[in-house]
Amino acid sequence: MNKIKHNKAECLEMFARLSEYIDNELDEITCRDIERHMASCKPCQVCLATLKRTVKLCENMKDQPLPQDFSLKLKHFIENLTEM
């Protein structure tokens, strides 16, 4: 069985940039570096495909208001964060 070496540090660096990559927010050189990495890294290919599917699912969701009770709890939680 032929195993390809997996560089975890490089994968984590790619993972940190994937959202920017799929949103076309990166420069050409960085995009090429990501594409070069993706060409030989199956785990990152799967991660990118999953992220793209997740974004597509979110884009197709209908906006729904949050229950008022949840909104109030969230607002209270956020206000308490700033006091920490």
Image: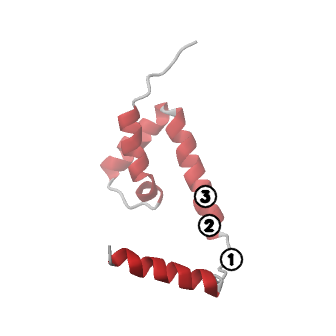
First reached walking from the N terminus: tag 1 or tag 3: 3
Mark 3 crowdedness (10 Å alpha carbons): few <14, some 14-19, many ≥20: few
Mark 2 crowdedness (10 Å alpha carbons): few <14, some 14-19, many ≥20: few
Q: Quadrant of residue 84?
A: bottom left
Q: Is residue 45 above or below residue 56?
A: above
Residue 71 placement (x, y as % from top left): 57, 83
Residue shown at 59%/49% (left/top)? 50
- Give amino acid for label 2: Cys
Of residues 78 and 29, the one drawn nearer to the viewer in this rendering? 78
- Give amino acid for label 3: Thr
Of residues 51 and 73, the one drawn nearer to the viewer in this rendering? 73
Q: CA distance from mark 2 to mark 3?
A: 6 Å
* Element type where label 1 sits in the image: loop
For the residues bearing labels 2 and 3, Cβ distance under 8 angstroms = yes
Of residues 46 and 26, the one drawn nearer to the viewer in this rendering? 46
Q: CA distance from mark 1 to mark 3?
A: 14 Å
Mark 1 crowdedness (10 Å alpha carbons): few <14, some 14-19, many ≥20: few
Image quadrant containing the N terminus: top right
Q: Is residue 60 above or below residue 63?
A: above
* Element type where label 3 sits in the image: helix
On screen, residue 78 versus residue 2, left or right, reads left
Q: Quadrant of residue 9?
A: top left
Q: Which residue, given by chain and number where applicable, does mark 2 sit on?
A: 58
Mark number displayed over residue 51: none
Residue shown at 53%/47% (left/top)? 48
Total numbered badges shown on the rendered structure = 3
Mark number displayed over residue 54: 3
Q: Is residue 36 above or below residue 28?
A: above
- Give amino acid for label 1: Lys
Mark number displayed over residue 62: 1
Residue shown at 48%/33% (left/top)? 41
Residue shown at 32%/55% (left/top)? 27
